Image (cartoon, grey):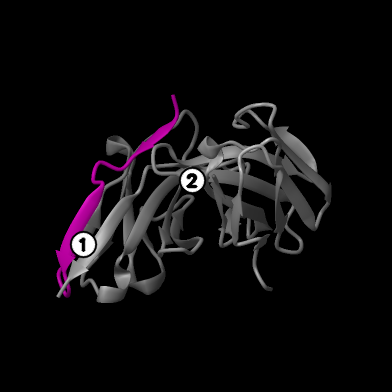
Amino acid sequence: AQSVTQPDIHITVSEGASLELRCNYSYGATPYLFWYVQSPGQGLQLLLKYFSGDTLVQGIKGFEAEFKRSQSSFNLRKPSVHWSDAAEYFCAVGSQAGTALIFGKGTTLSVSS
Amino acid sequence: DAGVIQSPRHEVTEMGQEVTLRCKPISGHNSLFWYRQTMMRGLELLIYFNNNVPIDDSGMPEDRFSAKMPNASFSTLKIQPSEPRDSAVYFCASSGLAGGQFIQYFGAGTRLSVL
């Protein structure tokens, strides 16, 4: 079955500390991977994507993610978290054909001062 | 571009009433998706269209839900009759081929409360 697992429901990080959000996927075809961020009451904003090539991808707001095929993972990282990064983060997988995305349940990030 | 536009942003209705959610995709995009977000089930696909034709409606919960895309710039999701368990945030997304890649862009969502 195709699925995305985000093992951490809620993470709290101190401002200025590093962040890693985990994502594992199960997908029958070549996966196209995405991270989206959702602020309260807002829609989903694309942070970054992986389609092919370099397995370390850079996104907006200083985020990066690394695709590890052997581990079926696509973890999101940021070296120094800002209070404005507090939000819900979703990992998603899709196909090259542009079909619907399969989302993880999300990880809520809180930033403490 | 203004992005994907959804209306209304909030809808409060009583059980049994008809609810219509609207979506205007990004101009030039040929795929449109309706997702539902709940605490229990997260983000789930309801239906998606390609070139105005429904391709996958396997996520539509039951016959009370229907979706249409009469043209490339407009889609509706209708619930009739509505029930309290339909309370959720409904997102519309659109995508088109750019640089050999399909990326979905989301609207701000419609928060539906059925009393």
Single out the mark in the foreground, 1 or 2: 2
Kind of residue indicated by mark 2:
Gln
Disc 1 target residue: A19
| Residue B15 position within the rendered picture, expressed as x and y whole percent measured from the top left | 61, 39
Mark 1, Cα crowd under 10 Å, few <14 / some 14-19 / many 20+, is some
Counting the numbered discs, the total is 2
Whether A9 is among the magenta residues is: yes
Query: CB atoms at circles 1 and 2 under 8 Å apart?
Result: no
Look at the numbered disc 2 and give the secondary structure of its residue: strand
Task: Report the front residue among B110 and A66.
Answer: B110
Q: CA distance from mark 1 to mark 2?
A: 25 Å
- Residue A7 picture quarter: top left
Disc 2 target residue: B37
Q: Quarter of the image containing the C terminus of chain B?
A: top right
Kind of residue indicated by mark 1:
Leu
Mark 2, Cα crowd under 10 Å, few <14 / some 14-19 / many 20+, is some
Task: Report the front residue among A21 and A40.
Answer: A40
For this orientation, the residue located farthest to the top is A1
- Residue A85 picture quarter: bottom left
The correct choice, above or below, for B67 with respect to A47 in the image is above
* Magenta highlight range: A1-19
